[in-house]
Image (cartoon, helix red, strand yellow):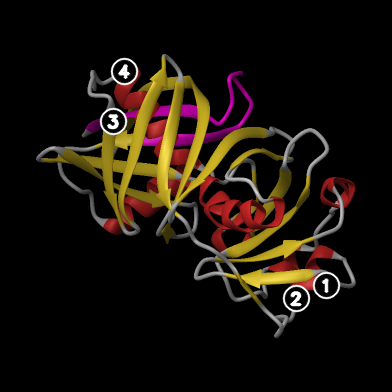
Amino acid sequence: MKLPIYIADAFTSKLFGGNPAAICPLHDWLPDATMQKLAAENNLSETAFIIEEDDHFRIRWFTPAAEVKLCGHATLASAHIFYTELGHSKPEIWFESLSGMLKVARKDENTYTLDFPANAPELETNIPGGLFEGLKIENALVYKTSFDYMVVVDSQQIIENLEPDFAQLAKVKARGVVTTAKGNGADFVSRCFYPQSGINEDPVTGSAHTIMVPYWARELGKTKLKAIQLSKRKGHIDCELRDNRVLMSGNAVTYLKGEYII
């Protein structure tokens, strides 16, 4: 059986930037074990599988190691493929997911806005083993959400210079670890590490910004924020906190169109 596959780079206007995601449109779900094997074979931070349901779509995301409940960049990449390759023409595209209904609006030819639930972090005083050891830092403010730990450090330079010990960081019982600081060329910057999910460093992480945006909106006293994720590929995200939702706008670029055979 031959099925279509696309790869798009999300949160970038340039090919080979941002975060690549594989998009696999389906008429019916494949077995979970098959989708997990395909995600491992693709070896990207996320592979999205999507089926159409009435007036919306249902989306599921798999890392090389596990299914996850929320992924921003693969949702943006999926919207891009549906608009540019699969004929979707409505102003918005709706994806039902394990985190509820997610909306993506097309702003222009290659720019999209994600509408995701905010995931405000809470201060954590019980620091888990492996966190500071894995980041190779001595102290910082630590916050926790239902997904990740978020570590706030004093400067962008500290974020840039992090060289994590991923074996230690993998001991932290969470989806992963988000590190963030005030930015020099943006309101805030970040790097995100997910060895627990089979991804040592994620290039650009939309779901992590649902955590960081509520925090930085409160700290900086503003609801519209510019963010840069400082991975080697870099990602640029225009963010807005609107009530209990986080809006994230960015570009996407198609890299690959093809078929896989199973």
| Residue occupied by mark 2 | 130
Badge 4 crowding class, 10 Å Cα cut-off, few under 14, some 14 to 19, many 20 or more, is few
**Which three-letter amino acid code belongs to the residue tagged 3?**
Glu
Q: Secondary structure at mark 2?
A: loop
Q: Mark on residue 92?
A: 3
Q: Nearer the viewer, mark 3 or mark 2?
A: 3
| Image: magenta residue range | 2-23
Label 2 vs 4, first from the N-terminus: 4
- In this view, the residue in front, 244 or 139, is 244
Q: Is residue 11 magenta?
A: yes
Which residue does the image show at 61% across and 63% down from the upper left? 176
248 to 209, vertically: above or below: above
**Which three-letter amino acid code belongs to the residue tagged 1?**
Glu
**Which three-letter amino acid code belongs to the residue tagged 4?**
Glu
Q: Secondary structure at mark 4?
A: loop
- In this view, the residue in front, 45 or 244, is 244
Between the residue at mark 1 and the residue at mark 4, the CA separation in whole angstroms equals 45 Å
| Residue occupied by mark 4 | 85
Q: Position of residue 123 (x, y in %)?
A: 66, 75
Q: Position of residue 62 (x, y in %)?
A: 42, 52
Q: Mark on residue 133?
A: 1
Quarter of the rendering occupied by the N terminus = top left
